[in-house]
Structures are given as C-alpha cells and as structure tokens.
Image (cartoon, helix red, strand yellow):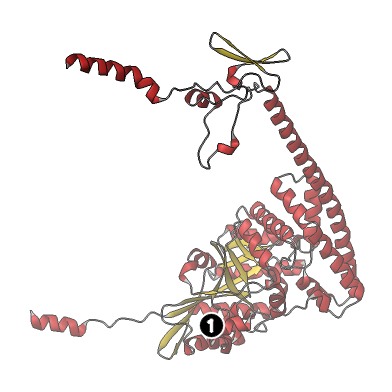
C-alpha cells in the first residue's frame, strides 16, 4: 500500500490560486433630450438583447417632457429581461445640497414613479451628478434604500485616503473606482457601487477605457491593495444623449471585448476582467471587496466631481441671488415640511406644489451644468425665476398647513386636559387625613392615620382640659371636640393617650400576698 500512497501524494494536483476578478457592469438612464436620443437608446438596447448583454437602467420622469416615449423603450427591455435592474434617479435630477425633507420626498416619490411605470423598482439609487451629502444618506435610509451608484470613492478626501488606504492614490482613477464603498450610519450601512462615465472619463473610446482599466487593476495588485480571491466591480455609464453613432459603436466594442474575457498576470497574480450582470452584483454585494468611505462632505464631493459651488460661479449676480433665495426658502420650511410629511396630512394641493418644485429643483451641480451647457444666462435666469415662484407658492402652502397642524395639536392637548380635569372632578372626595411629614423616613411608606392611631395613640392637643377655647366630652367611648358648635370625629383627631401606672405599684398586692403565704407556711 505504501507505493500506492506515495504515488497518490506525488500526482495530487497542486492547489489553484484564486483569481482577482473585476466585473464591468454597463448601465444607462432615461436622460434623453429628443426623439433621436430615444431612438438611439432603443437601438442600443436591441443590440444588448441580441448579444445577451444584461444591464441596469435608472429612471427620472422629467425626461418624458423632452423625450416622449423614453420610458416605453425602457419598459420593453425591462419586460424581456435585458434590463435586470431598474431603479430611480429622483424626480428633479438633483439631491446633494438640498434640505433633508426635499431629498426624502424626492427619493420616495421617484421610487413610486418607477414602481408605477415599470411594475417594479429596485431600491438602488443612481445619484444625480454623483453629488451627495449627509442628508442624502439619511433620506435613503428613511426610504429603505441601501445601495447607491455614483462616482464617489475613498479618494474624495485625499487625507482620509492616505491614512486608510496607503498607496491607493498612486493608482490611476480607474483602479480607485473598483471597490464597493460603505458609509456606516448607526447600525445601518449604505453601499456605494463605483461608477465611471464612458464619455467623460474615457473620451468615448473603447481602447482608452480598456487600457486604463487594465492599468488600474495592475496598479492595485502591485501596491498589494488587492490579492487572490478579491472580487472588484466597476459600473460604466453611457447616457442616451451621448449615443451618437461613433460613441455607441465604441461602447458596444468595449462590451464585446470584455464579454470575451480579458486576463492579465501581475506579480504572479492572475486577474480577469469579465462582463457583470447588475442583478447578480447587487444580490451578492457582500462578496465584493468593500472599503470604508469618508463622511460625505458636500463641497468636497461637488468639487471632486468637477462642479463649482454656486457662490463661486463667475456669472451674473442676479443668477446667484435667485439661486440663494430659492435655497433659503427651502431651508426655512424644511422642518415644517418634514412634520407635515411624517404626520400623513399631505393634501392634493400641497403634493402638486411640491411635485412642481421637485421637477424644477436645482442644486449647485445642476446650476453649474446649466451655466456651462446652456451658454445663455437668460435661459438660466428664466428657469430660476420659475423655480423661485413655485418655491414661494410651496412655502405659503407649507406654512398654512403647518399652522393648521399645530392648531389641531394644541386643540387636542386642550381637549385632553379638559377631559382629565372633568374626570378628576367626578372622583369621590376623600376625607382629609392627618400626616406627620417630619417623621417620614426615605424609602418607607407611611401608615394611614387610623392605623397609626390604633397602634400608638398620641396625646391630643387638648389633653389637659380646655385649651384654645376647645371642650372635650367623652360619650360612650366616643371622643368629640367642640368649637363654636362644630363637631370633629375622632377619626380626624388623635385619640387620648392612656396613662400607665408604674410597675412597682402594680406588683405591690402580689408581693404582700406572697409574704403572708410564706409566713403561714413557716
């Protein structure tokens, strides 16, 4: 048996090292501006279906105003299984920098829009402009959303990145966007799926994207940041308005190359780049390498994503004034609006007003993008004036509804107080009882007056006869006190103390009898 055993030991296969695997996930949204964009989106999704490519899509209903039919196209490919994840992208296409109540309303409303339009809604939020803040995380948790898609990574805060992940800043941007990020809020976690734009980050070229993705993966391995068995992910965005002929062909070429599988070996570690199904990614999120993300600082994230805060824009001062006034009004009604939403007392008029503001709402990123892309400041002013007017109408309704709600609460409190007082008035009146607070001991309950009087009778104030005009009369064991014709029962006055004789006086007859008995016996 020994030779056989030795043979088995020699020929046993060596353990195979686990690969580093990067899942590239293509996705799009409903950001179309014309019928041509809608047609290009339909063309791309048809190509995906024919090549068995699965992707994610995110919807915001405002796009229907400029590109009618865009949601019809998305729904067709949701129904046939080409789009395996369909989630919201808010109502206004703006979140970070807005008050909490508005962000909460936006996310909740966009989930309902998505559910109503497609019959389903994944609780995966595509963050508009990839700009968020603490209020975004709070609002997401309030709405049950625990997964975001954005370009936000640990390198938003360079100092944080150097402290937590040494060497990561030496890796190119593609490599820094291959980790699932995590924000911890109390006992809850909000995950961030890292995303890059095919057009903005890679110039809309397949060869550039593939080259930088390979280089990023190589850098992570060389710096020892990832090791065998790690699973990474990169979500790659192409929007409908970017789907001109050449760019669309390049994106499809990238997808084809990745779907064939790309392998590279770095420092003895094998890394594979594969095409990912967004559904499988979100369902197995905990199996991917996760890194801690710094607290979402709004201004840092805004600038990291390439946008300029409103007060730093070099624009007509009237634009800044319109924008700041609009934001100030929203902030002034934030707590009131939240109270109304949480009370469940929203009415149709207020909902419509809030919806109109949500569809027009801008944050700093949206304002900055409009200034750069519209190239006509008068158009920007016109939008802001309309937005400000709608916001003022909303504020009027919120204040009125809040005052009504507060009045109802005050009236309810008064009614409860009145009912309590009436209930107490109907209770039978208890006779007054004597108490001796000075004799009370902490932690011990005091006996009632009657039981205390029975166990230890006390000397009455009128024991020595008549004092202070009082008379004492004993009738058949009942003691009464009289003053000006009034009678007080013994229940409300201490009983008279019984006078006790000395022991020697009591025992004297016994001693004398015993003495006579002893003399007779003698």
Depth check, front residue: 450 or 324 = 450
The residue at 75%/55% (across/down) is 335
State the residue in front, 490 or 426. 490
Question: Would you call the spot at circle 1 few (<14 residues within 10 Å), some (14-19), or many (20 or more)?
Answer: some
Instruction: Identify the image quadrant of the C terminus.
Output: top left
Find residue 514 and report its image quarter.
Answer: top left
Q: Seen from this angle, which residue lies furthest left?
A: 1
Q: Residue at x 65, y 22 (%)?
A: 429
Q: Quadrant of residue 67?
A: bottom right
Q: Is residue 154 left or right of residue 320?
A: left
Q: How many marks?
A: 1
Pinpoint residue 398: horizontal percent, then vertical percent.
Answer: 81, 51
Q: Can you say whether 500 is above or below 393 in the image?
A: above
Q: Is residue 84 left or right of residue 418?
A: left
Above-or-below relation of 83 to 506: below
Q: Is residue 334 above or below residue 428?
A: below
Q: Give coordinates of residue 60: x percent, y percent.
A: 71, 61
* 321 lies left or right of 130: right
Expressed as whole percent of the image width and height from the top left, the position of residue 147 reads: 58, 65
Q: Is 200 situated above or below 119? A: below
Element class at badge 1:
loop
* Quadrant (top left, top right, bottom left, bottom right) of the N terminus: bottom left
Q: Nearer the viewer, residue 468 or 333?
A: 468
Q: Is residue 175 visible?
A: no
Query: Percent position (x, y) of residue 390?
Result: 86, 57
Is residue 307 shown to the viewer in this render?
A: yes
Which residue corresponds to mark 1?
165
* Viewer-nearest residue: 140 or 115: 140
């Amino acid at each position: 048996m020994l030779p056989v055993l030795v043979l088995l030991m020699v020929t046993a296969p060596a353990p195979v090292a686990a690969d580093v695997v990067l899942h590239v996930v293509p996705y799009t949204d409903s950001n179309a501006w014309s019928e041509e964009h809608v047609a290009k989106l339909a063309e791309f999704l048809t190509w995906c279906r024919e090549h068995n490519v699965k992707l994610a899509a995110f919807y915001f209903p405002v796009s229907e105003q400029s590109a009618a039919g865009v949601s019809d196209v998305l729904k067709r490919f949701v129904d046939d299984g080409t789009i395996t994840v369909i989630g919201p992208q808010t109502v206004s296409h703006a979140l970070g920098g807005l008050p909490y109540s508005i962000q909460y309303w936006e996310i909740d409303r966009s989930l309902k829009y998505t559910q109503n339009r497609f019959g389903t809604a994944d609780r995966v939020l595509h963050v508009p402009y990839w700009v968020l803040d603490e209020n975004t995380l709070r609002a997401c948790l309030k709405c049950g959303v625990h997964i975001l898609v954005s370009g936000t990574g640990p390198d938003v805060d360079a100092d944080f990145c150097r402290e937590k992940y040494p060497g990561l800043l030496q890796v190119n941007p593609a490599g820094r966007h291959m980790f699932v990020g995590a924000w911890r809020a109390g006992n809850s976690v909000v995950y961030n799926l890292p995303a890059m734009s095919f057009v903005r980050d890679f110039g809309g070229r397949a060869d550039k994207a593939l080259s930088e993705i390979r280089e990023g993966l190589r850098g992570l391995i060389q710096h020892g940041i990832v090791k065998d068995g790690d699973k990474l992910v990169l979500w790659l965005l192409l929007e409908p308005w970017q789907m001109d002929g050449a760019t669309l062909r390049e994106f499809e070429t990238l997808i084809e190359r990745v779907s064939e599988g790309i392998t590279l070996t770095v420092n003895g570690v094998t890394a594979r780049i594969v095409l990912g199904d967004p559904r499988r990614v979100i369902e197995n999120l905990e199996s991917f390498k996760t890194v801690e993300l710094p607290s979402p600082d709004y201004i840092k994230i805004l600038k990291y994503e390439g946008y300029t805060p409103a007060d730093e824009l070099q624009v007509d001062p009237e634009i800044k004034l319109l924008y700041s006034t609009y934001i100030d009004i929203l902030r002034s009604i934030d707590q009131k609006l939240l109270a109304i939403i949480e009370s469940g007392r929203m009415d149709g008029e207020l909902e419509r007003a809030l919806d109109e503001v949500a569809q027009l709402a801008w944050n700093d990123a949206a304002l900055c993008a409009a200034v750069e892309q519209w190239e006509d400041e008068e158009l920007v002013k016109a939008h802001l004036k309309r937005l400000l007017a709608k916001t003022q109408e909303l504020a009027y309704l919120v204040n009125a509804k809040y005052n009504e709600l507060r009045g109802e609460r005050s009236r309810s409190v008064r009614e409860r107080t009145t009912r309590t007082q009436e209930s107490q008035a109907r209770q039978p009146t208890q006779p007054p009882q004597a108490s001796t607070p000075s004799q009370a001991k902490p932690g011990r309950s005091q006996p009632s007056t009657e039981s205390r009087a029975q166990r230890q009778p006390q000397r009455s104030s009128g024991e020595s006869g008549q004092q202070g005009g009082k008379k004492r009369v004993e009738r058949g064991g009942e003691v009464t006190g009289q003053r000006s014709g009034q009678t007080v029962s013994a229940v409300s006055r201490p009983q008279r103390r019984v006078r006790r004789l000395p022991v020697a006086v009591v025992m004297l007859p016994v001693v004398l009898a015993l003495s006579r008995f002893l003399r007779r016996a003698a």
